[in-house]
Amino acid sequence: MARIELQNLAHSYTAKPAGPKDYALKPMDHVWEQGGAYALLGPSGCGKTTLLNIISGLLVPSEGRVLFDGRDVTEQPTEARNIAQVFQFPVVYDTMTVYENLAFPLRNRGLRGPAVDARVREIAALLDLTPDLNRRGRGLTADAKQKISLGRGLVRPDVAAILFDEPLTVIDPHLKWELRSKLKALHRALDLTMIYVTHDQTEALTFADTVVVMHDGAVVQIGRPDELFERPAHTFVGHFIGSPGMNLLPAEVAGRRAVVGGHALTLARGYPHLNGGSRVEIGVRPEFATLAPAGAGLPVRVRRIDDLGRVRIAKVELAGLPLAATVPETLSVAGEEASLLFDPAMVHVYADGHLVEGELA
Amino acid sequence: MDKPVNQGAWLLVLPVLLIVAFSAIVPLMTVVNYSVQDTFGNNQFFWNGIGWYQELLDPTTDLGGRFFDALWRNLLFSALILAIEVPLGIAVALSMPREGWRVAATLVVMALPLLIPWNVVGTIWQIFAREDIGLLGWAVNRLGIPYNYTADPLSAWVTIIAMDVWHWTSLVALLCYAGLRSIPDAFYQAARIDGASRWAIFRNIQLPKMHRVLLIAVLLRFMDSFMIYTEPFVVTGGGPGNSTTFVSIDLVKLALGQFDLGKAAALSIVYNLIILAVCWVFYTVMTRMDSGRN
Amino acid sequence: MSLVLDNVSRHVAGHTHVESVSLTLERGSLNVLLGPTLSGKTTLMRLMAGLDQPSAGRVLVDGRDVTGVHVRNRSVAMVYQQFINYPTLTVYENIASPLRVAKRPKAEIDAKVREAARLLKLEPYLDRTPLHLSGGQQQRTAIARALVKDAQLVLLDEPLANLDYKLREELREELPKIFAASGAVFVYATTEPTEALLLRGNTATLWEGRLAQFGRTPDVYRRPANLTSARVFSDPPLNTMRVHKRGAQLVLATGEHGAARGVLSALPDDSYTIGFRADHLYLQRPDPEAIAVAGTVAVSEITGSESFVHVDVGTDRWVAVTRGVLEVEPGERIEIFIDPRRLFVFGHDGGLAAAPPLVLAA
């Protein structure tokens, strides 16, 4: 079992941190529930790998505590915690066969003979490695090596949490799909806590039930993928999740009316009069902004249309402000004049980057 | 990558070629000539054909006997120093610091023995190991162990082996250290998570990754030790008796001591061929390792 | 300048890196080399640059055979996946280095460096060394350095692969504009089909050292010449199945059947392989003539904007993508639909037998 709790956890690489800038990880409290599938999502340098290494024991935090099922493990080394970690670069013992690789953690803990054999074969079957059991570690492909790394973690009977540090970076796109579904299926089959660190939102959102978005050492939002997508609590989350990210337009908001670039919009909720010092923006994702023939909605100039195969994205300008919008399959765009329709329920208001809760009329 | 072809470069190389021809190839041909003659250097030549070679390679003859004895001594010496220097070098490399100011300090200290001219090394040990005024020799004898390298063959061997280990272990250590440094941290972290013991980490991660540099180290040391001359010559002169007379020492004795130039020439040719053979093995193994790896 | 690869192959130590590839790249074009790792992209780029010699075939620049000519004598610039910059020089000096080597006058160097820095948004960083730059900025420096050379051939080998997702998006948007201004032949290698679609231009699909197809990107995407090209150019992976056409009926390997409509009706009776991308596998009946296929849900993935459902159908594993959030339980038996008018059909040799028209009549 592994219910992992972080209490007032922070980390600074300098001995005497003077202010927030010196912290690689700002003070945080979080609970990772047993059996959950979590993703730590954020750009390079946001602190996600630092956090992962603190949880796994490869790094001791400068402040705060880490508890596994109530037990303080902050100072304890990795071996004493019942976790496994899969790294970005596949770690495989070249001189041993796949079988011996998988058996390695068990043998190190003193298990012998038939117990080892049964467990190795069970995990190999789970990971589709059975035909390769007798091959040497050296000549295998990257995805096979990652599966072996994962297998070495799964094979231990006491393992309760698996941590992934950008494991699919070196894998080809085709195989990423396979491995991802394999990970998801594994999570369902085994009752393990899985924490997955990545900067790739597709990986994070498809794998996790709960996504923790990090920026600059702090947690910005935690939620289900669809929550993060439909209601980002912060403009950073709006920008970081979604390809392309959320459109953010400076606006004046009062009541149920927003004025953007001289054009008025009706909002789904009512807001107090916002302005006077704070930076007010409305945010709407390209998926909820649809291009329409001129005259149907807000007037825009079409700068460019990208055909992404299953969707077309239009880059437009509303009174000089850049926006991305979806082009419906049936619409053929001629010339630069068009208009934009928003889904009002998906238009959000942000003040200084934070989501403002509106009142339903 | 295919290297650029520049025909003009040959002109620059021509002077060097001429010098090499003059100082190496012509004398080499002279030696080959001498090896098929019977001569004592006084310009009198008697044709001997492959006679010297036959004698050399026949252990029952005087010359052949000498040669094979010296050859076995060389092989024994090389085997012994490899058996000591390789594990010792690995052990030293494992304990060398990986970060901080100590790295630079350690590297300098490790490099020092390699920088000393070889005959100076010999001279140092010659004095150091003397049982009357040498620190080592005197101390060992005081401890009750009889030790006299000028009189006792075993002591002589111990001395020159100790000297070689002192001189060259750093090379093995430095090469292995370089190999170790190239192992990414993720491997150590993964091994810790797998619960691997220190020994298991060594066997399964460090040793395989050091495989290539170890091969270089072993082959370099083998070749160098097989050709050894200066250090043992300065310390023991080949004695006591001929207990530390290696092929190189014997060759010099033959050529410059006895002036038996025909035999010496043949011996030097054979010695050269043996070393060329070792070099060829070196080259083949290295290139096969390279292509195997790719 | 135009670049032609005439039936080039490269074999190294018994391994075939590239086999019989012929390509014609026009002046001012952006060409994407798309394929998985070890498909020959880097080898081809090195052959184009003159860093390696082909084992067979010729390389022609503007009609001249330059096969033996070393890269130093060709007009080439290259950007690598690992950010390659001179670590001790400032950004300014890094960008200026090829011009200094060519001994251009100072004023010209300054003007060109500043222009390149402007294009790549490096102006605030001109005085920094690469160590003090983020990954994205380092790669921009490398690209700027390649641009100032004014080379006629610019090669980019997966330049964005080591960057964060969002940085990749940013640069990907900017690159085509930067390329368009230059007029050189650009060659861009990538493993991701989405990048090829975003960069437009032409795409060459590669697989195991062979060229599967080369043409305008939308054409290669919508009319794959063969099964290999279709597979390479699909993300999520292409859904395929063996089918049999009998008269007016299309019979699937799993037994379901439906009317052979659209371009399928003109095909001779035979067995084929059908291929279709994830967005043409429907979780709800799109129209009355669609063929229903029974399957079991293996995995379902939600990104918020889209949902991916992996379904086991017979011995095949298919992926369907749909907009929005769709929750299905693994293990659930569901019905999924394919539209016979939207299928690629491939013959026994893998070549395209039929493809849907580019604009589908309603």
Image (cartoon, rainbow, N blue to C red):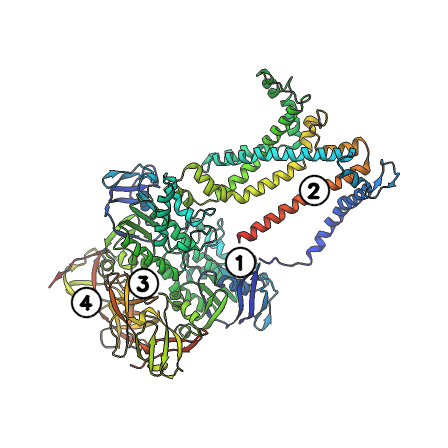
Q: Which residue is mark 1?
A: C98
The quarter of the picture where the C terminus of chain C appears is bottom left
Closer to us: B263 or C79: B263
- The three-letter amino acid code for the residue at tag 4 is Pro
Q: Are marks 2 and 1 in contact (CB under 8 Å)?
A: no
Closer to us: C29 or A300: C29
Q: Are marks 4 and 1 in contact (CB under 8 Å)?
A: no
Residue C45's spot in the image, x, y percent? Answer: 51, 63
- Measured in 3D between alpha carbons, the distance from the residue under mark 2 to the one under mark 4, in whole angstroms, is 88 Å
- Tally of numbered tags: 4
* Residue under the image location 23 percent in, 77 percent down: A295
- Measured in 3D between alpha carbons, the distance from the residue under mark 2 to the one under mark 1, in whole angstroms, is 50 Å
Mark 4 or mark 3: name the one nearer the start of the chain. 3
Q: Which residue is mark 3?
A: A243
Residue C155's spot in the image, x, y percent? Answer: 49, 63
Q: Which residue is mark 2?
A: B274
- Measured in 3D between alpha carbons, the distance from the residue under mark 1 to the one under mark 3, in whole angstroms, is 36 Å
Task: Please state which of the two labelled residues, at mark 3 or mark 2, is closer to the viewer.
Answer: 2
- Measured in 3D between alpha carbons, the distance from the residue under mark 4 to the one under mark 1, in whole angstroms, is 53 Å
Subunit bearing disc 1: C
Closer to us: A266 or B174: B174
